[in-house]
Image (spheres, rainbow, N blue to C red):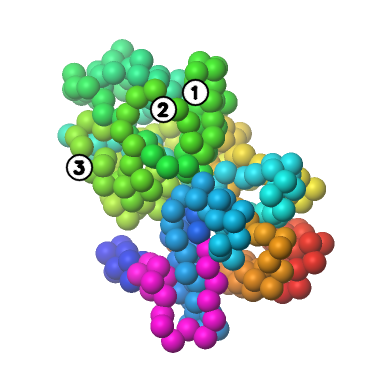
Amino acid sequence: MRRFWMLFVLTAVLFSFGIAQAAERLDGAGSTFAYPIYSAWAHDYYKLTGVELNYQSIGSGGGIKQIENKTVDFGASDAPLTPEELRKAHLIQFPTVIGGVVPVVNIPGIKAGQMKMDADTLSRIYLGEVKFWDDARIRALNPGLRLPHHEISVVHRSEASGTTAIFTTYLAKISPEWKAKVGEGTAVNWPVGLGAKGSEGVSNYVKRIPYSISYVEFAYILQERMANVLMKNREGQFVSPTFDSFKEAAAKADFSPARDFYLWLVDSPGRKSWPIAGGTFILLSKDKPQSNQKVCKFFDWSYRNGDKTAEKLAYVPLPLSLKNKIRNYWKKEGIAY
């Protein structure tokens, strides 16, 4: 595992800063959720083709803004845009992989996978109603766990984030109070907590602040060795975040090209299903046909050659039938890759 993450870090450095001798470059920006897999795919693609990908992991909100402004070749977002939003901005979108957003805690003496949580309790923590780790609601979920009487330090993303959109969409679907008071989206008016920029910032905050809680993409849990919780899914089962639980969440996903693949995967059915799952999406401007051809060529290669790499990072590759739908979608949009 150590050797794997050393390779991953090296890959990320090459991906972020590029290689000076690259004959050709594509610029992208957005999702931190997708950064680990895009960096790994980019490393392999560069070795094969000499084409460099310069990707800025700035959050989905930034990625949407930059592709709308046409300052990058592609934007990346974990919050899909509706067909109406896409038409207004003259964009198209398609998914690349499916993954999970995971609540994490830093409570001295409590290890990864020991704490159980459900959506109602989680929403009440983020509403500021559950203030201490030994609150009766948390104790009821964790009868055998020694919980300290210590105030909960709540951490959330500070910038517009697709990870936040998945997280808050899940809370809004389960909790009427959360939906009424806060709602869902890439940026919300958080009732309590400290904001941190990017998944890297959130990870650092939680690692440094005892008795804290936040949410990150699963790849960052592996990388940073953070303590995840078990989540109660819609079938009433407490499940761990794993490749298999993400895969079950994605099993009945119906991404439709007629809706530009707009779909949320939170609270999906299945006994082993992870409840806070989502796709991550690429956004292209219809006004950039030349770069669109090159971007789609890269993702077509990734669809054909990148599944094993995605699985190593605990992302769920798209099924072949969906990949073919996406290729037909590109052709319909006039993209010859």
Q: Residue at x 45, y 27 (%)?
A: 189
Front one among 8 and 145:
8
Q: Which residue is mark 1?
A: 182
Label 2 amino acid?
A: Trp
Q: Which residue is mark 3?
A: 208
Q: Which residues are magenta?
A: 12-28
Q: Which residue is mark 2?
A: 190
Residue 46 shown left or right of residue 89 in the figure = left
| Residue 303 x, y percent position in the rendering | 62, 66
Q: Residue at x 35, y 24 (%)?
A: 192
Which label sits in the foreground, 2 or 3?
2
Q: Are marks 1 and 2 in contact (CB under 8 Å)?
A: yes
The mark nearer the N terminus, 1 or 3, is 1
Q: Secondary structure at mark 1?
A: loop
Does residue 315 appear in the picture of this structure?
no
| Magenta run includes residue 98 | no
Label 3 amino acid?
A: Arg
The mark nearer the N terminus, 2 or 3, is 2
Quadrant location of the N terminus?
A: bottom left
Front one among 21 and 12:
21
Q: Residue at x 80, y 48 (%)?
A: 258
Which label sits in the foreground, 1 or 3?
1
Mark 2 surroundings: few (<14), some (14-19) or many (≥20) residues within 10 A = some
